[in-house]
Amino acid sequence: MNIRLILNLLLATIVLAAISVWMGQQSYAWLPPQAAAESKMVDDLFSFLVALGSFIFFGVTGAIIYSILFHRASKYDYSDGPPIEGNVTLEIVWTAIPILLVFWIAGISYQTYERMATHGPMEIVHLHVPGMEEAYAVAIEDTIDPDESIEVRARQWAWEFRYPDGVTSTELHLPVNQRVHLNLISEDVIHGFYVPAFRLKQDIIPDRTIDFEFTPVREGRYRLRDSQYSGTYFATMQTDVVVESEDAYESWLADASGHPPAESFNQAADEYYQASQKSVIPGWKTIAPAPAPIVNYPTSIKDSQS
């Protein structure tokens, strides 16, 4: 291999790496705002995978285009190409590179989820890796009261949140920059606690209380969705997550505690009632929604979108 070819390959690799890093940086704009400490780590991992995938994609595509343009067989040339079988060096290279990439991706992914320290049903298998940098999410954990937790009850098709002081709501309020501890409970089937802005998703299994922790870091109103198909109206099982300052959170708790419990609006029950009033009833059966939650702070879809 001559020097000129080596320099050309080196230059092509540098240009390819620069393009791949740029693609990785662009990937941050493809995702919702980072509203939790864990979302920063997930986005960094996603950016790394986009950059690595771009390097492989553009590298393979460029090699194919180069071969088609500059190494095409001449007309009436039906001879065989250079033999590949038996080339030990080539076989070692194309076997070792994918293996190393898999181990690299696995290592980076494991470190990310270890640093997130997101407690869930698998927290007992989290292992500490010596020398690993402490996570941002873990650093915030010192500011919270571990005795306080919010109970999250999921049913077909409504969310209900119960706070330690007895306040209940169909809208989840959280203080910013404080570690949040949730007890996830399903009253019927498998549901999924999923807030895209937090980059966190946790399945909720019936007959099991799941401890779940994370740290919201950006004030605002975000959307909580059911990530699992839980029946006909599972798409209506949405509500807002309000991340606010400590003072606003305490003020909201005090205000909500003064409200007498009332039935909240339930979109699934509303749609089910409207469908039952139609003159033509479809031939298939539908599960009736669970009764609407009776809470201190009921909200409606219209209120949450205003």
Image: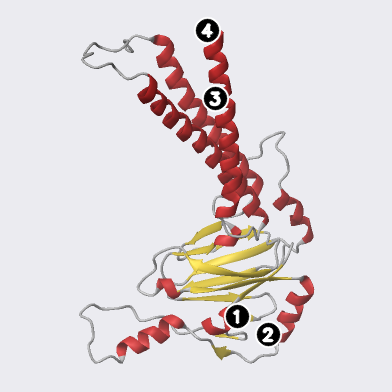
- For disc 4, the marked residue is 2
Residue pointed to by mark 3: 12
Indicate which disc, 4 or 2, sits on the residue closer to the N terminus.
4
Q: Are marks 1 and 4 in contact (CB under 8 Å)?
A: no
Amino acid found under the numbered disc labelled 1: Ser
Neighbor class of circle 2 (other Cα within 10 Å; few <14, some 14-19, many 20+) is some
SS class of the residue under badge 4? loop
Q: Are marks 1 and 2 in contact (CB under 8 Å)?
A: yes
Q: Nearer the viewer, residue 128 or 222?
A: 222
State the image coordinates of residue 50 (x, y, percent, origin top left).
Answer: 53, 42
Q: CA distance from mark 4 to mark 2?
A: 77 Å
Q: Label 1's element? A: strand
Q: Amino acid at mark 3?
A: Ala
Q: Which image quadrant for residue 112?
A: top right
Residue at image mark 1:
169
Give the mark toward the camera: 1 or 4: 4
Query: Alpha carbon of mark 2 to alpha carbon of mark 3: how far?
Result: 62 Å
Question: Answer yes or no: do the residues labelled 4 and 3 have beta carbons within 8 Å?
Answer: no
Instruction: Identify the residue shown where x is 72% and y is 34%.
Output: 131
Q: Which mark is residue 262?
A: none
Label 2, on which residue?
Answer: 256
Residue lying at 74% horizontally and 56% vertically, measured from the top left: 141
Q: Is residue 126 visible?
A: no
Q: Earlier in the sequence, mark 1 or mark 3?
A: 3
- Tell me the residue at 70%/37% (across/down): 132
Q: CA distance from mark 1 to mark 4?
A: 72 Å
Q: Is residue 140 above or below residue 269?
A: above
